[in-house]
Image (cartoon, rainbow, N blue to C red):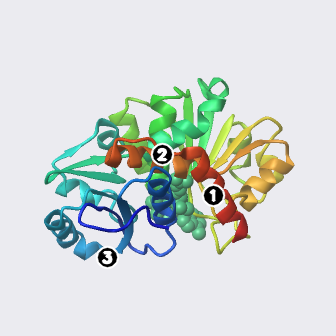
């Protein structure tokens, strides 16, 4: 679906990544432009790591209004930008770029998506001990949000590659002056007690994402308890095996769709100065994902 008749006034937005074919962002943003009757179009660009600089020069020459930036470019893009927002600077990654007449500004809207998603549980999370599974880009946004916005007391980072977890610990301890981070290897059942002692558990890995829907970071029911909050940043499928298991133990489960839409809504606002129709987009994407 595209918003309007494409003509000389149409503003172009893109998403730059590699690979890019599974991205739902074109569907979401084009739907959102259509709902607001905006003359914008959103297009995916599959750009390998060694062509990023060329791609940016090309976008500037074409006068593209902005773009999302995803794996593997979220960190490398920073060197090509004139300016990055405070939160993108702290997180160390950019997912949204705005082109203001040739002046490229970088933002990170993933943290906003995390905050909007976990806001209903703020009272429970504030001051709590929490666990994050994964140590990649999504983990960075979650760490930032939990330290800055939810003011958690301690964080466990659990990752397959412990060195990456250690790196995040050192980075955030220094950058956000938050010393209470422990690291663990993702090795169930050894981590069961760590998970069970956490008021909030967040999966930020791609384990369990379509098409590998039988995978889960932990297969052990006693990782969870009734009333615990368990958030999976994955949104395809809407209910991962990880969330299914947590739900079976009475945990409150949250999937990644709200985060995905809210980060997109913030990007939409940065490009268009308008608010996305989040409720309608949520309804349509839920329908779409329930079909697959
Ligand atoms: P990333 O930077 O590549 O990090 C991937 C993480 O997953 C790493 O911690 C990696 O562990 C771990 N991992 C991957 N495969 C694994 C496996 N088979 N076994 C154990 N660990 C594994 O990726 P990312 O940008 O953080 O994205 C991660 C997930 O978050 C993706 O599913 C993505 O779609 C989702 N996401 C969702 C949203 C949203 O809005 N809902 C936003 C951003 C990302 P190692 O360090 O050991 O490699």
The residues tagged by marks 3 and 1 sit, at their Cα atoms, a distance apart of: 31 Å
The answer as to whether callout 2 falls within 8 Å of ligand 1 is no
Element marked by disc 2? loop
Residues at discs 1 and 2 in contact (Cβ within 8 Å): no
Which image quarter: residue 164? bottom left
In percent of width and height, residue 268 lies at 40, 49
Depth order, front residue of 289/228? 289
Residue sitting at 71 percent across and 36 percent down?
Answer: 197
* Relative height, residue 194 to residue 96 (above, below): above
Residue sitting at 32 percent across and 63 percent down?
Answer: 73
* Residue picked out by circle 1: 284
The residues tagged by marks 3 and 2 sit, at their Cα atoms, a distance apart of: 30 Å
Instruction: Determine if residue 134 is in view.
Output: no
Depth order, front residue of 185/83? 83
* Residue picked out by circle 3: 48
Depth order, front residue of 77/205? 77
Element marked by disc 1? helix
Residue sitting at 29 percent across and 62 percent down?
Answer: 10
In percent of width and height, residue 234 lies at 61, 58
Left or right of 82: which side holds 263? right
Residues at discs 3 and 1 in contact (Cβ within 8 Å): no
Instruction: Determine if residue 38 is in view.
Output: yes
Image quarter where the C terminus lies is bottom right
The residues tagged by marks 1 and 2 sit, at their Cα atoms, a distance apart of: 13 Å
Res 276 label: 2
Nearest-to-viewer mark from 3 and 2: 2
Q: Earlier in the sequence, mark 3 or mark 2?
A: 3
Residues at discs 3 and 2 in contact (Cβ within 8 Å): no
Q: Earlier in the sequence, mark 1 or mark 2?
A: 2
């Amino acid at each position: 679906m595209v918003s309007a008749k494409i003509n000389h006034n149409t503003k172009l937005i893109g998403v730059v990544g590699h690979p890019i074919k599974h991205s739902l962002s074109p569907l979401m943003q084009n739907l959102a432009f259509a709902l607001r009757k905006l003359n914008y179009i959103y297009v995916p660009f599959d750009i390998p790591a060694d062509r990023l600089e060329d791609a940016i020069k090309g976008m500037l020459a074409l006068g593209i209004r902005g773009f999302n930036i995803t794996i593997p470019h979220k960190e490398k893009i920073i060197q090509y930008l004139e300016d990055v927002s405070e939160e993108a600077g702290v997180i160390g990654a950019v997912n949204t770029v705005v082109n203001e007449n040739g002046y490229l500004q970088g933002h990170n809207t993933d943290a906003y998506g995390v905050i909007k998603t976990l806001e209903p549980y703020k009272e429970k999370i504030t001051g709590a001990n929490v666990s994050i599974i994964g140590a990649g880009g999504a983990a960075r946004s979650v760490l930032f949000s939990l330290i800055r916005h939810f003011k958690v007391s301690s964080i466990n980072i659990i990752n397959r590659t412990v060195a990456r977890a250690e790196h995040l610990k050192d980075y955030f301890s220094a950058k956000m002056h938050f010393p209470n981070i422990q690291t663990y290897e993702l090795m169930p059942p050894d981590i069961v007690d760590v998970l069970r002692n956490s008021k909030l558990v967040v999966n930020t890995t791609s384990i369990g994402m379509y098409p590998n829907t039988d995978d889960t970071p932990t297969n052990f029911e006693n990782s969870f308890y009734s009333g615990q909050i368990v958030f999976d940043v994955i949104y395809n499928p809407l209910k991962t095996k990880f969330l299914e298991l947590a739900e079976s133990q009475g945990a409150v489960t949250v999937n990644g769709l709200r985060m995905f839409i809210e980060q997109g809504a913030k990007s939409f606002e940065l490009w268009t100065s308008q608010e996305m129709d989040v409720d309608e987009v949520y309804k349509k994407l839920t329908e779409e994902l329930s079909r697959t």
